[in-house]
């Protein structure tokens, strides 16, 4: 970057010194201010990378209160700006106070322009490097889908499947624990499909009483039951031309499952109390945090409905299994909530990083979002600590060092990563792991894994 494109704000109330500094930095894009109000106005208008600021500002230039307040407001508005404070001769105590509050560096009067220019040049160089680093970091682990951070092998595999499945009309089943982002992925399927300009209608089958769910889904005719004062369209009919998302379909009552199966087979519905068959063109996406095969064994879910809704099955890994991307997602959320709250938070402290990496996260990404959102509000300094996250001592302790448990965790992770790399091909996965096919099947049984959901064929809509 050339000097002419480098924006420098000089905040100084001494006209003689200000003139000297303008001359010193004539090769830069220089803006000036004499007090806090004009400094903040220039900061907002020009967004300089570096600020050179006197600590002694009006109305009490002999003190530092106004200068420190200007520093605080500058960093709150532009936390990445490099602020170099200029102090009186021998005033190291206030200079160190300014640095502790976030100033990049300090310089003591009398001013030696050559030395000061070196400080400013270095501040620009550091700022440019940090900007480039932030840009590259955001791209290295950028998800192929807007709004989804995928920095682990498991989530990258999920995103690849979403991209391939989205343009089709197959019925997809999203499997994952509560809080793993099933609705976010369902919306991504809709957004990347040809139906994106039409409605995305979501309904939680576990949140609506059983006696109302049928009417909510299929609609009802006037007078079909007590309180049915007018004809009402159901969610399926409202979603015509778009996407219907059935969240927690595992909680759908058995009696209603039969009617849902007929709709999925015939693509027609009948409103409650009605006899007219209504054709509906809708793409259906389902999700559950339960194991459908276990529900079938228990008699709580129809096997034929399961096969109908799982033309494509997408397994979403829980947050605790996203080792490679756990901290990246946390930092992304920290940036999001810091910006929303107007807080100049620079990152996580060492104890917060340790807590994020080792805490079990039973609530998955939803719990992480809640903790980080609260931490941004509670943080006193520039860094979020484990205490700000509300993770008590002991909750984020290191995992067991028992060799048997360590080996089990490592084996399970290695198998998942190998399946991802080989797109579920059993022979290639076994070769990559250095085991035979029978041994790999034994490991599948041991850790409750399968190749389903990893294959290219499944991702492309095959069975």
Image: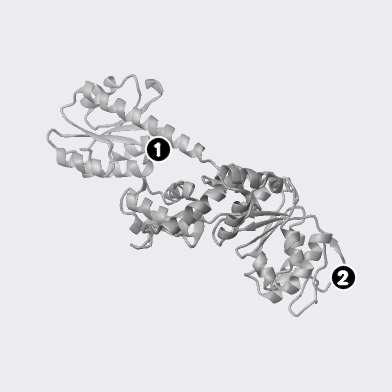
Q: Position of residue 175 (x, y in %)?
A: 62, 58
Q: Residue at x 34, y 39 (%)?
A: 40
Does 261 appear above or below 165? Answer: below
Q: Position of residue 49 (x, y in %)?
A: 37, 32
Q: Which residue is mark 2?
A: 275
Q: Position of residue 152 (x, y in %)?
A: 52, 46
Element on which disc 1 rests: helix
Does 439 appear above or below 296? Answer: above
Q: Position of residue 88 (x, y in %)?
A: 15, 34
Q: Is residue 246 left or right of residue 98?
A: right
The tag earlier along the polypeptide, 2 or 1, is: 1
Q: Quadrant location of residue 119?
A: top left
Q: Nearer the viewer, residue 118 or 365?
A: 365
Q: Which residue is mark 1?
A: 44
Q: Is residue 338 left or right of residue 102?
A: right
Distance CA(mark 2)–CA(mark 1): 65 Å
User: For the image shown, how many numbered marks are present on the structure?
Assistant: 2
Q: Nearer the viewer, residue 76 or 293?
A: 293
Could one spot residue 425 in this view of the protein?
no
Q: Is residue 64 left or right of residue 459?
A: left
Rate crowding at label 2 as few (under 14), some (14 to 19) or many (20 or more) other CA atoms within 10 Å: few
Rate crowding at label 1 as few (under 14), some (14 to 19) or many (20 or more) other CA atoms within 10 Å: few
Q: Residue most toward the bottom?
A: 226
Q: Nearer the viewer, residue 401 or 223?
A: 401
Q: Is residue 447 left or right of residue 231?
A: left
Element on which disc 2 rests: loop
């Amino acid at each position: 970057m050339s000097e002419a494109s480098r924006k420098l704000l000089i905040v100084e109330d001494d006209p003689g010194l200000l003139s000297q500094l303008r001359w010193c930095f004539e090769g830069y894009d220089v803006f000036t201010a004499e007090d806090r109000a004009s400094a903040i106005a220039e900061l907002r208008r020009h967004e300089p990378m570096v600020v050179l600021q006197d600590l002694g500002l009006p109305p009490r230039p002999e003190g530092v209160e106004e200068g420190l307040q200007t520093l605080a407001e500058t960093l709150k508005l532009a936390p990445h700006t490099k602020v170099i404070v200029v102090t009186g001769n021998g005033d190291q105590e206030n200079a160190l106070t300014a640095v502790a509050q976030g100033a990049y560096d300090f310089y003591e009067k009398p001013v030696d322009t050559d030395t000061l220019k070196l400080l400013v040049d270095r501040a620009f160089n550091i700022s440019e490097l940090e900007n480039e680093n932030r840009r590259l970091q955001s791209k290295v682990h950028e998800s192929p889908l807007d709004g989804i951070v995928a920095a682990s092998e498991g989530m990258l595999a999920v995103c690849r499947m979403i991209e391939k499945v989205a343009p089709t009309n197959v019925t997809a089943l999203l499997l994952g624990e509560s809080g793993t982002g099933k609705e976010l992925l369902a919306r991504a399927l809709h957004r990347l499909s040809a139906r994106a300009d039409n409605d995305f209608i979501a309904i939680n089958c576990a949140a609506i009483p059983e006696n109302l769910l049928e009417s909510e889904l299929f609609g009802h005719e006037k007078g079909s039951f007590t309180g049915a004062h007018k004809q009402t369209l159901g969610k399926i009919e409202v979603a015509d031309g778009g996407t219907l998302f059935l969240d927690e379909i595992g909680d759908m009552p058995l009696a209603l499952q039969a009617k849902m199966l007929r709709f999925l087979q015939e693509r027609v519905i009948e409103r409650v109390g009605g006899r007219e068959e209504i054709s509906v063109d809708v793409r259906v996406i389902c999700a559950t945090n339960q194991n459908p095969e276990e529900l079938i064994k228990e008699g709580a879910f129809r096997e034929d409905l399961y096969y109908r809704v799982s033309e494509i099955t997408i397994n979403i890994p829980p947050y605790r299994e996203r080792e490679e991307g756990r901290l990246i997602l946390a930092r992304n959320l920290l940036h999001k909530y810091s910006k929303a709250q107007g807080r100049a938070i620079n990152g996580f402290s060492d104890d917060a990083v340790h807590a994020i990496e080792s805490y079990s996260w039973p609530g998955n990404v939803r719990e992480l979002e809640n903790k980080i959102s609260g931490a941004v509000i509670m943080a006193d300094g520039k860094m979020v600590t484990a205490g700000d996250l509300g993770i008590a001592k002991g909750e984020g302790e290191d995992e067991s060092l028992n060799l048997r448990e360590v080996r089990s965790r490592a084996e399970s992770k290695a198998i998942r990563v190998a399946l991802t790399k080989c797109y579920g091909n059993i022979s290639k996965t076994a070769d990559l792991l250095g085991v035979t096919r029978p041994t790999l099947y034994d490991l599948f049984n041991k850790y409750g894994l399968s190749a389903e959901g990893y294959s290219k064929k499944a991702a492309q809509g095959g069975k």
